[in-house]
Image: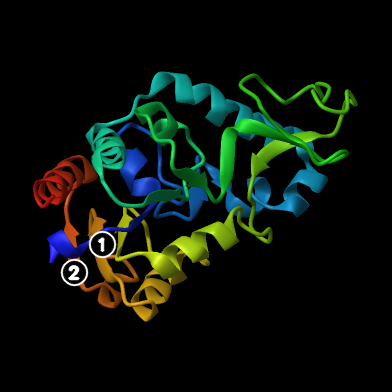
Amino acid sequence: MLAAMRNIVILTGAGISAESGIPTFRASDGLWENHRIEDVATPQAFRRNPALVQRFYDARRAFLGQVEPNAAHLALARLEAEWPGDFLLVTQNVDDLHDRAGHTHLLHMHGELNSALCTRCGAARPWRGPLLGDPACPACRQAGGLRPDIVWFGEIPYHMERIETAIAACDLFVSIGTSGAVYPAAGFVSQARHAGARTLELNLEPSAGTPLFDEAKHGPASVLVPAWVEAMLASR
């Protein structure tokens, strides 16, 4: 069956970066880095207290310098480089670990920490420093309009048309390190099944979507993903 696979779409979530030291999005107590989601991850929160939101994401952005891609990130980059068919990696993560691992066929559907979005002119630009203090937009040169280029609750994820087109054409859909509870990403497995693709979940533990997959394997991503990549490349 592996030999018949050609086009692959992979979805990754917080679980793949957790082993690099990046906390998962929502802890068991419902908080994210000791903040209520409603206070740091909605457009309303930004309008209500922009300084709090900027400080929160400035700290997350600075923390990226302290972590590195782990074995799972590197294995997926190897699969992309050596796979003979179409390959697309879609991540819900806003960190840059997939980028640093070497991916080029990569879509950040929830935005990126290392990007700033101008609310005045709409331009998105690479950004690695702090946003607190109202720096000027590199595009329109106006100050006071930059926000984290993050898709917050209530906003539409990026690249949805490209993602759905790829899922409709894939032979294999793989979900790695996701909760299976956040839409629209949680619905990708059903779309893939409807299109006739095989589906596989690789996750630390069963997720809300596990029953929807043809196959599920549970354990650390840094163990499961390299082993799966080895099997996929051996099938070629």
Q: Earlier in the sequence, mark 1 or mark 2?
A: 1
Compared with residue 224, is residue 143 higher up or lower down, i.e. above or below?
above
Q: State which quarter of the image contains the N terminus.
A: bottom left
As helix, strand or loop, the secondary structure at mark 1 comes to strand
Compared with residue 198, is residue 24 higher up or lower down, i.e. above or below?
above
Circle 1 residue? 201
Classify residue 234 as left or right of residue 129. left
Classify residue 225 as left or right of residue 165. left
Is residue 181 visible in the rendered image? The answer is: no
Classify residue 112 as left or right of residue 176. right
Residue lying furthest front: 84
- Residue at 54%, 22% in the rendered image: 62
Disc on res. 215: 2
User: Is there CB contact under 8 Å for labels 1 and 2?
Assistant: yes
- Residue at 37%, 70% in the rendered image: 189
Q: Position of residue 44 (x, y in %)?
A: 77, 53
Compared with residue 34, is residue 189 higher up or lower down, i.e. above or below?
below
Q: Position of residue 107 (x, y in %)?
A: 50, 46
Is residue 153 visible in the rendered image? The answer is: yes
| Amino acid type at image mark 2 | Glu
Whole-angstrom CA distance, mark 1 to mark 2, is 6 Å
Q: Quadrant of residue 22?
A: top left
As helix, strand or loop, the secondary structure at mark 2 comes to strand
Q: Position of residue 36 (x, y in %)?
A: 59, 50
Q: How is the image coloured?
A: rainbow
Q: Position of residue 132 (x, y in %)?
A: 74, 25
Q: Quadrant of residue 223?
A: top left
**Residue placed most toward the observer, 164 or 235:** 235
- Estimate how packed mark 1 is, as few (under 14), some (14 to 19) or many (20 or more) residues with alpha carbons within 10 Å: many
